[in-house]
Amino acid sequence: MSRYAVNSLLYRLKKDRAFRERFLAEPASALAGLDLTEAERTAFLARDMKQINALGGYLHLVMSVPGLAAHVSHPERD
Amino acid sequence: MGRIVFAGAMSHVLDPDYYQEVCGLSGRRKVEACMTEIRAMGERLLARRPDALVVIADDHLNAFSFNAVPALCVRIGRHVDRMVQEEAEAFDRALEGLPERYAVHEDLANRILEDGMTAGFDLALSWEAPVDHAFLSPVMTLHGMQPVIPLVPIWVNCFVAPQPTPARCFAFGRHLARVVAGGPWDVGIIATGGLSHFPELSLPRVGESDTIFDRKLLHWLEKGEHEPLQALTVGELDKAGEHEFLNWMALIGAVTPAPADVRYFGELGRINLAAVEWRLA
């Protein structure tokens, strides 16, 4: 597991629109050549932000990548 | 001789739409109540006509990527821009519609940086880092429609382990107080973030704010009991979702032993909202 590889990929997905669009269109190709473990690659291909967070992805990134963010809501009693 | 003329700390996603989306109407009402108190704090801040506003906050992996993550960083230069995020999600949307550029109080920022280096604080510096919601949401809520006081943004690494310790942040706050006392400026100082949310930065634990821990912190602040705060560990803060209290620790160091008034505390599972103002001599 590489905290750096997971988070630099999340950061790029958040900040680099062209890369994000490429990932959304051709995920396996976009991830090719990146230094990810099989578990990390599988989690990204599945867009499984919960698993990406469990593998070391920083919470604020997994909650804010446009179009891929983990949405968690907690409606309170009014 | 300069003075700290205002000190306050507050939550930093001040966006009713966001809280309505993630917490329902109750969330909207609570953040609006919190914002009402912060606006009143802003009136007191502006009435004291400070020359500069030091803003101690954290980066949410926006300004600093993984090429470098400074423990403590002072923003120097003449201007600072707000972070721009295309297709913003969640808390990033709190920035939308805010002005793009803000004046930096260059002389005070340079004093904090240069005197810090000679006083034993190996501070990072940045001419370019933009500021995200952690800085601008409170700054704009405090100011309302009034012109924004020249800022000195200071980042504390609250999230990327290993973080600076609470005691170290407090000591850095003592340095801020010495710089202000040695200069000619009247200075406001705010710390942002919190209170408890996102324990252990774990997605399954989003929604588990730690109200007991928050009440303990607020009790110490109201009493001006700052020794137990300095004994806290980064691990304790992480477990209780109090990561951003490191920002508050720097402010507390700057104003110790002043007691504080809790202007607002509102419980939400998502995050406990707070606004606190210190009673300065």
Image: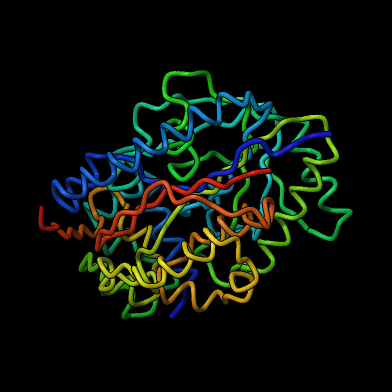
Quadrant in which residue B98 is drawn: top left
For the image shown, how many numbered marks are present on the structure? 0
Q: Return the x and y of residue B65 as percentages of the image width and height.
A: 53, 54
User: Residue at (10%, 52%) from the top-left corner?
Assistant: A78
The structure's colour scheme is rainbow
Direction from residue B161 to residue B271 in the image, left or right:
left
Query: In which quadrant is the N terminus of chain B drawn?
Result: top right
Q: Nearer the viewer, residue A43 or B157?
A: B157
Residue B136 against residue A28 in the figure, above or below: above
Residue B165 against residue B268 in the figure, above or below: below
Direction from residue B132 to residue B36 in the image, left or right:
left
Q: Return the x and y of residue B161 as percentages of the image width and height.
A: 55, 71
Direction from residue B250 to residue B66 in the image, left or right:
left
Residue B58 against residue B47 in the figure, above or below: below
Query: In which quadrant is the C terminus of chain B drawn?
Result: top right
User: Residue at (16%, 49%) from the top-left corner?
Assistant: B26
